Image (cartoon, rainbow, N blue to C red):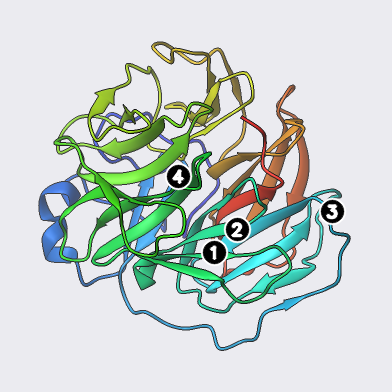
Amino acid sequence: MFLRCRPALPALVLVTAACSSGTHTVPPAYVQSHSALAPADRTIVVGSHVVRFGGTVKSNTAAGWLRPAPANQPLLYGASYDGDFINIYPAQGNNQTPIGQLTSGLTSPQGLAVDKFGRLWAANTNAFNVVAFKRGATTPFRTLNDPGYYPVSVAVDSNGTVYAANVQGSSGQAGNVTAWAAGSTNPTKVLSYSGFQIVVGIGIDANDNVYVSYIPQSGPPALVKFGPHSKTAQPVPIQNATLSDVTFDSSGNLVMEDGSGSLGVWAPPYNGMPARTLPAFGNEPTLNRRESKVCVAYANFQNPQIECYSYTTGKLVDTITSGWTGSAIPYGDAYDPAAPL
């Protein structure tokens, strides 16, 4: 099982947490042999980021629920791949208990995003789609088809175009990014790059540039940028970054995991080392509306929790264990409302 410890430096294409026995590992030969492993449940661990896909597809038969809450109450969502649900928490407090849970239409949900209208989008990994919920609803209002690919992360631009990072195809083909223009349920664009092998993280800046983190066929994790209306990838010469979800603050700083097991904050144009780091350790960094806190989903079978840190000081200010178990751990999280870009 995953143990909480500082990850090893990424000397290999794929690295795993440097812990004692029991840690899920991915062999260095994974990239070369992945197509033969396509039917199996797979786990990728790079730094502290954990991604899962494939294997037996199961459905959650429980009914979703939601307690009445003020319309303007800030919320925090957490997705469980193993539990096939998304927990809903009040954003304020400490070790908050869920005030709702989404289950309808969910199959191995992972990455989450909230758009400017307060709609929640979830990468429904093993169902090959992305589903969306309106705030206050327990059933999805839209399903975006992503045939043949495993979406693990999702982002929405200012025009309502939804993008999903596809870790890999169902037959082992290299990962890519699928896009759906606002209102479309079938793909309207695919972003590919010759360097893509395993694609995990995605983020969109204030100018609707799309950033994608990936593992190439050889070499360390890398980052590329696609312009708002472009299908051409531009390598980003960022330093000491690893495979991670990507987000941005209102100052244009790029936030993602660094190669030393911390959360890095890179100033534009992202061509060097991080300007500062925070001791956050987990999946999908998400900033609250005021940018006072940043939360991560700690995908750990022994200590499943969402952790929130002061974005200014790096101090741990909230640990949410309520709603998680050893068989239903968090893989993604998102604030509503999201931080403005």
* Nearest the eye: 151 or 259: 151
Looking at the image, is mark 3 or mark 4 nearer the viewer?
A: 3
Q: Is residue 269 above or below residue 128?
A: above
Question: How far across and how far down the image is residue 111, in percent?
Answer: 49, 54
Q: Earlier in the sequence, mark 1 or mark 2?
A: 2
Say which residue appears at 58% left-offset and 69% top-offset: 326
Q: Are marks 1 and 4 in contact (CB under 8 Å)?
A: no
Tell me: 212 left or right of 337. left
Q: What mark, if any, has residue 73 been given in the picture?
A: 3
* Nearest the eye: 213 or 182: 182
Q: Is residue 41 above or below residue 253?
A: below
Residue 341 figure quarter? top right
Q: Are marks 2 and 3 in contact (CB under 8 Å)?
A: no
SS of the residue under disc 2: strand
Amino acid type at mark 4: His
Question: How far across and how far down the image is residue 60, in percent?
Answer: 53, 83
* Nearest the eye: 247 or 37: 247
Residue 217 figure quarter? top left
Cα gap from disc 1 to disc 2, whole angstroms: 5 Å
Cα gap from disc 2 to disc 3, whole angstroms: 15 Å
Q: Is residue 302 visible?
A: no
Q: Earlier in the sequence, mark 1 or mark 3?
A: 3
Q: Is residue 323 visible?
A: yes
Cα gap from disc 3 to disc 4, whole angstroms: 29 Å
Residue at the spot of label 1:
132
Residue at the spot of label 4:
49
